[in-house]
């Protein structure tokens, strides 16, 4: 049984409760408090730190690679694709407005994509024309053949550059977001798992058999783990496996790189290489919320590292990890009202770093 001191403070009724302390949860809380400073906001997070995809990603400040944007346009149409690219572009701008680059190790070294099929290049001019109104650039994507040797990517046929993309330190960004939340008097319950939700006059969030917290409104920012609460939403968990090398002498690689419509992604972290992806080798096995790495996919990534990036140069793996993204039939996030008092901001399709700042604004307008 809890004391009156706990019930009157930590577990008192709030105006808004947000479930999930990842990028979408934190940016949503910040957007709400900036728009409605009088509202009390509580974030409930089941882990000791934000987890999911937010602290387990590759640290990409993603705009979207050329072939990925083309593939999205063919699947969703150009209107939805451009809406999504705009959200990512504006989200990255907002991150840079809120935080100094050195606070979050933000580097705008450009994004690159390896392309091995010449026929894809014929669509570049049309894509650039579509993106011009978003980026303000005549050529968002340009062919940079001279950089293939510069980066040591000798076996690549074509290299496409995108100056709108960068990298950052996801942990440092989350810490800065948490600092901002504390400045705005946003409260937290970490290490607290939500058992179930009831909605009547208020929304009641049950934390255990005899403990709950009430709010006027509730927002799910649980991304790949949303099916526990919202069973009817089209959300497919997608595990992204990653490896990081030990330092490599004379490493030429600098920037963020994509391959095969973004299914492979790699970057330098100082003089190390971080490589992730390959889930298209076994989609079904990687449709999971289990934070594990598999021998098959890690071996596949090591071969990719050897054949495409380092060309048989020696390397040693320092770390391996996985994060859980949320995918669906299309890449647009699900940001909507799900009942009279409940909302959701989920399914960020592996682009949470860039999308979350804008998703938070949309939810703040909805409530």
Image (spheres, grey):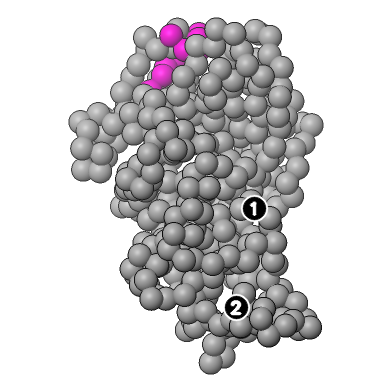
Which quarter of the figure has residue 135?
top left
Side (left or right) of 227 relative to 217: right
Residue at the location (33% across, 68% down)? 35
- Quarter of the picture containing the C terminus is bottom left
Nearer to the camera, 77 or 192: 192
Nearer to the camera, 27 or 52: 27
- Quarter of the picture containing the N terminus is bottom right
Query: Where residue 9 is drawn, which disc sits there?
Result: 2
| Location of residue 273 in the rendering, given as x and y in whole percent from the top left corner | 59, 22
- Secondary structure, mark 2, is loop
Which segment did they paint magenta? 150-160
Which quarter of the figure has residue 127?
top left
Foreground disc of the pair 2, 1: 2
Residue at the location (44% across, 59% down)? 183
| Location of residue 157 in the rendering, given as x and y in whole percent from the top left corner | 45, 14
Kindly check if marks 2 and 1 are in contact, taking CB atoms under 8 A apart as contact.
no
């Amino acid at each position: 049984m809890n004391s009156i001191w706990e019930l009157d403070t930590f577990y008192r009724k709030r105006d808004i409760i947000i479930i999930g302390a990842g990028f979408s949860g934190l940016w949503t809380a910040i957007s709400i408090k900036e728009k409605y400073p009088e509202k009390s906001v509580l974030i409930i997070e089941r882990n000791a730190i934000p987890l999911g995809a937010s602290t387990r990603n590759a640290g990409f400040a993603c705009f979207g690679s050329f072939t990925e944007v083309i593939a999205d346009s063919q699947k969703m149409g150009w209107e939805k694709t451009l809406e999504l690219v705009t959200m990512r572009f504006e989200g990255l701008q907002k991150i840079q407005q809120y935080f100094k680059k050195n606070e979050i190790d933000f580097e705008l070294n450009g994004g690159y994509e390896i392309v091995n099929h010449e026929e894809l290049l014929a669509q570049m001019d049309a894509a650039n024309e579509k993106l011009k109104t978003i980026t303000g650039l005549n050529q968002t994507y340009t062919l940079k053949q001279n950089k293939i040797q510069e980066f040591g990517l000798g076996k690549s046929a074509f290299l496409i550059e995108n100056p709108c993309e960068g990298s950052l330190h996801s942990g440092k960004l989350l810490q800065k977001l948490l600092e901002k939340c504390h400045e705005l008097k946003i409260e937290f319950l970490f290490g607290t798992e939500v058992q179930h939700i009831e909605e009547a006059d208020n929304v009641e969030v049950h934390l255990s058999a005899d403990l709950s917290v009430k709010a006027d409104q509730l927002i799910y920012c649980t991304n790949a783990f949303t099916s526990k609460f919202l069973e009817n939403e089209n959300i497919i968990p997608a595990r992204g496996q990653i490896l990081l090398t030990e330092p490599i002498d004379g490493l030429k690689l600098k920037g963020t790189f994509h391959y095969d419509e973004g299914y492979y992604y790699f970057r330098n972290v100082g003089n190390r290489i971080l490589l992730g992806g390959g889930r298209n080798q076994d989609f079904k096995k990687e449709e999971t919320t289990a934070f594990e790495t598999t021998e098959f996919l890690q071996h596949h990534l090591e071969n990719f590292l050897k054949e495409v990036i380092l060309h048989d140069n020696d390397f040693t793996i320092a770390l391996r990890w996985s994060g859980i993204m949320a995918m669906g039939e299309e890449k647009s996030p699900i940001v909507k009202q799900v009942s009279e008092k409940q909302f959701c901001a989920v399914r960020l399709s592996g682009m949470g770093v860039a999308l979350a700042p804008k998703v938070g604004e949309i939810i703040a307008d909805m409530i």
